[in-house]
Image: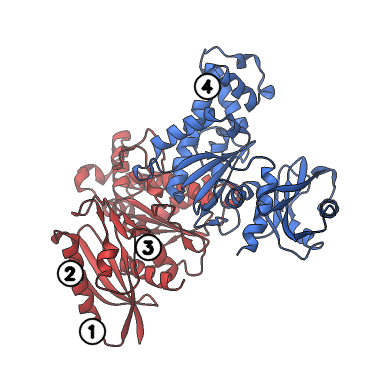
Chain colours: A red, B blue
Amino acid sequence: MKEVAIGIDVGGTNTAIGLVDKDGRCLALSTISTNSFPTPEEFVRAVHACIQSLLSNAADWQLKGIGIGAPNGNYYNGTIEFAPNLRWRGVIRLVDLVKQFYALPVILTNDANAAAIGEMVYGGAKGMRDFIVITLGTGLGSGIVANGELVYGHDGFAGEIGHTIVDPSGRVCGCGRRGCLETYASAPGITRTVFELIAETTTPSSLRSVAFDDLTAAMITDAAKSGDALALEAYERTGRVLGLKLADAVAHTSPSAIFLFGGLANAGEFIFAPTKRHMENYLLNIFRNKVQLLPSGLTDNAAILGASALVWKETAK
Amino acid sequence: MKEVAIGIDVGGTNTAIGLVDKDGRCLALSTISTNSFPTPEEFVRAVHACIQSLLSNAADWQLKGIGIGAPNGNYYNGTIEFAPNLRWRGVIRLVDLVKQFYALPVILTNDANAAAIGEMVYGGAKGMRDFIVITLGTGLGSGIVANGELVYGHDGFAGEIGHTIVDPSGRVCGCGRRGCLETYASAPGITRTVFELIAETTTPSSLRSVAFDDLTAAMITDAAKSGDALALEAYERTGRVLGLKLADAVAHTSPSAIFLFGGLANAGEFIFAPTKRHMENYLLNIFRNKVQLLPSGLTDNAAILGASALVWKETAK
């Protein structure tokens, strides 16, 4: 009997469901459209059908549990709470709904926490007891591990480094406040920085011909690759702000490594080099030259792996 | 047989040694002058003599272990590392030296971490799994507890919230960088804020007749009590900066409470009210009206209690 776990990555558009073994191999994979289900109950019925279909492919697999990564997922309550990108309003008791079909451990947390557990179980953080995962996408998510355990906080909402404040009179954030880290260090954040530089400077750039709504982080990376000075400066500024707040994060939990994960992390040295340089510059002397800044060790199907890792982490307790 | 622990508070001037029971009662107490001993070995011999004298007072006490709070104390290594206020240079292997005299658990950590453990074992954090203790004295120290365990970090140096950065071009800090929280929120920090306000404003104040070297936080509190507008504004500014960075700390570990401890915390509502108001204002909505801001539950001999609590915490594992 081969032990397997189900990993479910609930996204605003699609939900991906995968069967994963203990070594982090994704053995089977399926996708459904999240928002085509008017109620969470209908959604969970579809998820169940999907899991049964995945399991039917091999008789010698023993399912150990189900892990779910979801936006605004709360580990303690097993709920999705007021997720702005999902059509279901309020508090969704997703774990209870899934447990109606399975007498197995069902564990839910938010996407960034799932990424951190994935990094610990299958990725670059194997054997590390203190590390942080930063997800750089539409927003900036984070999962903090201390003493070998994910930090959930008293209410299950710990790890909101994206909403630490860079400048109280800074950029307007979707959360209603100003100057949050994710308004600078995220895919939309670097886009805003490009437009700030277009306004501030006369530096020639291919990006001057692109409208804000059309500009993507990948286009900024491509411009940087071709030597575009404005794009390079946008990465430099992003790295300065991210490095400053990562130095603050190190002063809290003193991790041995910080992993960067997600779209903007794929820009490689364009984002890693300035972030590392500024972080070292802003670190208290006792922390200097000790914290590794690393790309995620999870490659394909990272979100599913992260969600499935919750099962191995929980059942190992 | 009554079980007791020794708590040792190593300070730059004096070292206090106390016998403490499981309920946090300090049964006997003694003090020696830290810097009158040219070497750590001589210091530890004096500490040993002192402990033997304390224990000789009652035959029915069973010593369970020795806890030590010390500046720059490292939990993992049992060392004091490069403490600027002590006469012994470099790395002092204090735990090894004490263990030459006792076949018992000997545990060392820094002052703020000891305060956090003391709060958990005897104080206001009993039963809490996630909280932060902030010590407001000559500097700003912090001890972070997550999942019921003190966060030491990979190297034993976690919890340096006093050296998170408020403003990279702000006040010069003793650590060699600029804009650290403790340059604003500490006894010397509020003194600097008074002088900033004297320079910036024409607000009348009794503090205008005092030289910087003579001004203490207690004098600022006394002026505030008598309605001095400049002193009140100094507390307002201190609370704004502290509230901003405590909101950042909440975004990291989501504690159920933050305890303020030490000299400046004795200013009561003058420091608590603006800190709480600004912290709430800077908090991400999911954290609002959830985090208690509390005075320490440890009153007399708090540093000794904190150090002794390390023993009960460690032997309960």
Q: Which mark is residue B232?
A: 4
Are dots 3 and 2 on a single chain?
yes
**What is the three-letter code of the residue carrying label 4?**
Leu
Residue labelled with disc 1: A57
Dot 3 crowding, Cα within 10 Å, few <14, some 14–19, many 20+: many
Q: Secondary structure at mark 1?
A: loop
Q: CA distance from mark 4 to mark 3?
A: 46 Å
Residue B189: mark: none
* Badge 3 or badge 2: first in the primary sequence: 2
- The three-letter code of the residue at mark 1 reads Asn
Give the Cα distance between marks 2 and 4.
61 Å
- Residue A149 visible from this viewpoint: yes
Question: Which marked residue is nearer to the observer: mark 3 or mark 2?
Answer: 2
- Residue contact between numbered discs 1 and 3, judged by CB atoms under 8 Å: no
Q: Position of residue A200 (x, y in %)?
A: 32, 34
Mark 1 packing: few (<14 Cα in 10 Å), some, or many (20+)? few
Q: Residue at x 19, y 54 (%)?
A: A88
Have a look at marks 1 and 3 and say if they share a chain: yes
Q: In what quadrant of the picture does the N terminus of chain B appear?
A: bottom right
For mark 2, give the secondary structure: helix
Relative horizontal placement of residue B52, taking residue A137 as reference (left or right):
right
Q: Which residue is mark 2?
A: A46
User: Which residue was labeled with disc 3?
Assistant: A115
Q: Is B214 placed above or below B275 here?
A: above
Tell me where residue B283 sits by quadrant.
top left
Tag 2 subunit: A
The amino acid beneath tag 3 is: Ala
Secondary structure state at the residue bearing disc 4: helix
Identify which amino acid the numbered label 2 is placed on.
Ala
